[in-house]
Image (cartoon, rainbow, N blue to C red):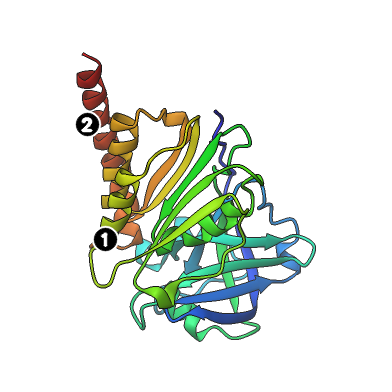
Amino acid sequence: MATGTARRTPKVNKGRVLRKEKITPHMIRVVVGGEELAGFGAGEFTDHYVKLLFAPPGAEYREPFDIEAIRAELPREQWPVTRTYTVRAWDPEAVELTLDFVYHGDEGLAGPWAANAEPGDEIRFLGPGGGYAPSAEADWHLLVGDESALPAIGASLERVPEGVPARVFIEVEGPEEEQKLDAPASADIVWLHRDGGRVGDALVRAVRELDFPEGDVHAFVHGEAGFVKDLRRHLRVERQVALEQLSISGYWRYGRDDEAWRSAKADWNRRIEEEEARALAARSA
């Protein structure tokens, strides 16, 4: 089953804030647009993402903005800092890009930017990247994630074919963080409340206890790397789900900022693959 592994070459885009709204106590939606976004190119995948570019304190860049020149001419500490966010929606006719931000007060870069954004503010970003959309060939779909994966899950539900079963587990802090999602009647959406617990524990329990429908599944499992690792092993080894039927990756990891996680992610994934290969070999022996 094809999972759409192609990746687009990222490019620098510039948008202007059009409007924003607080859709839950800890989720802010920002819509950006402007003629510079014409032909942005999102739409093929439902996990499209962009890398927002934030200038470090004191850094100034000449126009026209040239990220390659910046990296060639300036010391690394003056390079733009990136934060990765999933595209919630892209409207090519209105030229509007919708991004949802998890907001935890003054912590971090992107959340505070979203909270303080005003119409007319400019933001530059790389992208779009992406590689997943619900397969029309699947007998059923499994969508699992925490808040960081919620935009992609919401976009994906809008593309699940009517009548095809979808089992959806979304973990948030509490009922106040639930959102209204457009989904086919065949989708069973379960909101799990963390209530101060560790991110992902409820998701792992829910998937382990799930009575899988018959047929081939196409699964999307994203969020904090610890629970993603647990569910990858469960799906690959215990449920015998083929790798090509999975879109599964850690969007973030406890105790790591975006740069630190990106630098460690390849090695993290390699070790998971090695452990998985050993487990599969032992199971088939």
- The answer to whether 206 appears left or right of 81 in the picture is left
Q: Which residue is mark 1?
A: 256
Left or right: 94 in relation to 99? right
Q: Amino acid at mark 1?
A: Arg
Tell me the SS state at disc 1: loop
Residue 256 vs 104, above or below: the answer is: above
Q: Residue at x 55, y 49 (%)?
A: 129
The kind of residue tagged 2 is: Glu
Please provide percent x and percent y for residue 61.
53, 71
Q: Which image quarter holds the C terminus?
A: top left
Q: Tag 2, which secondary structure?
A: helix
Residue appearing at x 46%, y 37% in the figure: 213
Q: Quadrant of the N terminus?
A: top right
Residue 281, located in which quarter of the rendered image?
top left
The mark that comes first in sequence, 2 or 1, is 1
Which quadrant would residue 165 be assigned to in this image? top right
Q: Closest to the observer: 265 or 90?
A: 90
Q: Which residue is mark 2?
A: 275
Q: Comparing marks 2 and 1, which lies closer to the viewer?
A: 2
Q: Residues within 10 Å of mark 1 (few under 14, many from 20)?
A: few
Q: Position of residue 53 (x, y in %)?
A: 49, 66
Q: Is residue 276 above or below residue 93?
A: above
Q: Disc 2 to disc 1, how far (Cα)?
A: 22 Å
x, y percent for residue 130: 54, 47
The answer to whether residue 250 is above or below residue 281 is: below
